[in-house]
Amino acid sequence: GDSVTQMEGPVTLSEEAFLTINCTYTATGYPSLFWYVQYPGEGLQLLLKATKADDKGSNKGFEATYRKETTSFHLEKGSVQVSDSAVYFCALSDQGYSTLTFGKGTMLLVSP
Amino acid sequence: DTAVSQTPKYLVTQMGNDKSIKCEQNLGHDTMYWYKQDSKKFLKIMFSYNNKELIINETVPNRFSPKSPDKAHLNLHINSLELGDSAVYFCASSQARSNEQFFGPGTRLTVL
């Protein structure tokens, strides 16, 4: 079946540091890939997505590129802020009515 | 203005009780979902409904019964609550054939 593997957290960074959160996936078809963010005490929000190979999703300074050859969708940001502290989930979805398959989430803690 | 809303936000109850969680979306979507997030933040699909019909039912105890009175509502009823049911339950919705899902704020269920 489909699966998503994310790096274990927490990831602890100082403000303005460079962020990478690794995500790799296993899927039988050609899934769409997503990053969701969950701020403390809130629900999940879609951060960015990519629907086919070599697509780059971007939002709020975050980027991720759909790499079919390495089955990866790593999340990056050039300069993190304290307000980016949250749990980040990588997810995939096959076509049709299929649901999201999530990774286990990576907590990011950014200190001033 | 809330796109996907859930009630209640917090639910504390005794083992053996029956409880319900309600979900409503005003996005005009025709597919709705229930996810369970455990204490380690892992998210797993429970059910998916499309146009009031159950389309995905993952391995969930039959004490859990979803009900969709119309396209905008998907409620979750849980019978004979157990300690292991303690979790945060998220409702989500999407347009059919779109794998972009919008999440509610979650309901934190605590079974004592």
Image (spheres, coloured by chain):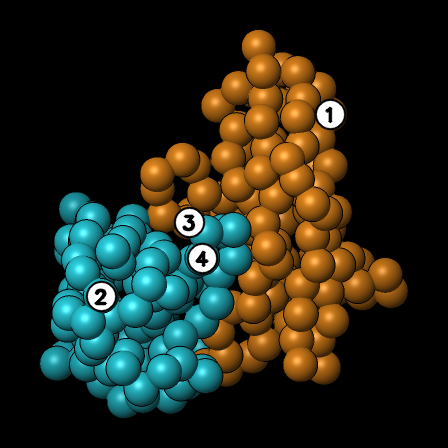
Q: Position of residue B22 (x, y in %)?
A: 16, 65
Q: Are marks 4 and 1 on the same chain?
A: no
Which hue is chain B drawn in? Answer: cyan
Name which residue lies at 56% across and 44% down: A88
Tag 1 residue? A18
Instruction: State whether residue A83 appears in this view.
Output: yes
From this view, report whether residue B41 is shown above or below residue B50: above
From this view, report whether residue A60 is shown above or below residue B13: above
For the C terminus of chain A, the image quarter is top right
Q: Nearer the viewer, residue B23 or B98?
A: B23
A29 lies left or right of A81: right
Earlier sequence position, callout 2 versus callout 4: 2
Mark whose residue sits in front, 3 or 2? 2
Tag 3 residue? A44
Rendered image quadrant of residue A34: bottom right
The chain whose colour is orange is A
Q: Spatial distance from mark 3 to mark 2, Cα to Cα?
A: 28 Å
Name which residue lies at 24% across and 70% down: B81
Mark whose residue sits in front, 1 or 2? 2
Residue type highlighted by circle 2: Met
Tag 4 residue? B38
Residue type highlighted by circle 3: Leu
Name which residue lies at 18% across and 61% down: B14
Name which residue lies at 17% across and 58% down: B13
Residue type highlighted by circle 4: Asp
Tag 4 near tag 1, CB within 8 Å: no
Tag 2 residue? B15
Earlier sequence position, callout 1 versus callout 3: 1
Looking at the rendered structure, the secondary structure element under dot 3 is strand
Mark 3 Cα-neighbour bin, 10 Å: few <14, some 14–19, many ≥20: many
Q: Are marks 4 and 3 on the same chain?
A: no
